[in-house]
Image: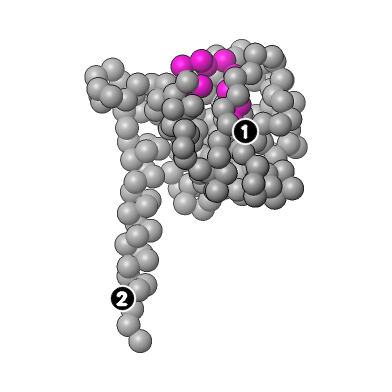
Amino acid sequence: MSRLPDLARQRHGLLRTTVLAAVFGVISVLPGAAQDVTEPSLKAAFVYNLAKFTEWPADVLPPAAPLVACVMGETPVAQALERIVKGRLVMGHSVSVVRLTGDAPHRSCHLLYAAGLTTAQVGALGAAAQGAAMLTVIDSDAATRPPMIAHLFVENGKLRFDLDHGRAKRSRLQLSSKLLPLAKRVYDEPGGAAP
């Protein structure tokens, strides 16, 4: 029996990983690095791709329901995310972008992106979202580990991210195994160090 199909699958997997790495870790956010890529559009692309590699439980996101992506504190990222998701699907779901103005996430959010918050606001937001099947993404240069599933930050001119896999599991979200190796750090235990 030929091993050609196995090699083709391996090459496809490698290509997909390479493309993900390009989207998640290689594109620079320094001015002039890419003329058509702005920082808000790059952050929106990260959020969209994080959603693409996340599975929600069927009782939270039924097959015909739209995925509700909430944005708190970053109008330019919300606008860029609206442009990116227009006409696209995430795991077969259309995406609806909602801009939040309050301090707490709506329970109808499947994804929450927040930026420009104080440390106290981040803590309160993490506590409010705890246990909800919500992909929480914080955009912060804080040195401490935020109480969110994904943490976006700029390091050496590149947009990077950490993942709290343990928090995702406790929120009943399934992060793709293809996503985990692209993170700078992956946490699996509450308050524990990254492996």
* Residue 132 in sight in this render: yes
Say if the magenta span includes residue 70. Answer: yes
Amino acid carrying label 1: it is Val
Of the two numbered discs 2 and 1 on the same chain, state the one appearing first in sequence: 2
* Neighbourhood count class around disc 2 (C-alpha, 10 Å): few under 14, some 14–19, many 20 upward: few
**Which residues fall within the magenta stretch?**
68-78
Q: Is residue 30 left or right of residue 20?
A: left
**Local SS, label 1:** strand
Q: Is residue 172 left or right of residue 23?
A: right
Mark 2–mark 1 Cα distance, whole angstroms, equals 41 Å
The label number, if any, that marks residue 187 in the structure image: none
- How many marks the image carries: the answer is 2
Q: Which residue is mark 1?
A: 68
* Quarter where residue 123 is shown: top right
Between 64 and 156, the residue placed more toward the observer is: 64
Give above or below for 168 relative to 12: above
Q: Which of the image's four quarters has the N terminus? A: bottom left
Q: Which residue is mark 2?
A: 4
Give above or below for 166 relative to 161: below
Residue 72, given in percent of the width and then of the height, sits at 59, 19
The label nearer to you, 2 versus 1, is 1
Residue 26, given in percent of the width and then of the height, sits at 32, 36
**Local SS, label 2:** helix
Residue drawn 37% across the image and 66% down it: 9
Between 156 and 40, the residue placed more toward the observer is: 40
* Residue 119 in sight in this render: no
Residue drawn 71% across the image and 20% down it: 104
Residue drawn 61% across the image and 38% down it: 67
Residue 38, given in percent of the width and then of the height, sits at 35, 21
Amino acid carrying label 2: it is Leu
Residue 42, given in percent of the width and then of the height, sits at 39, 28
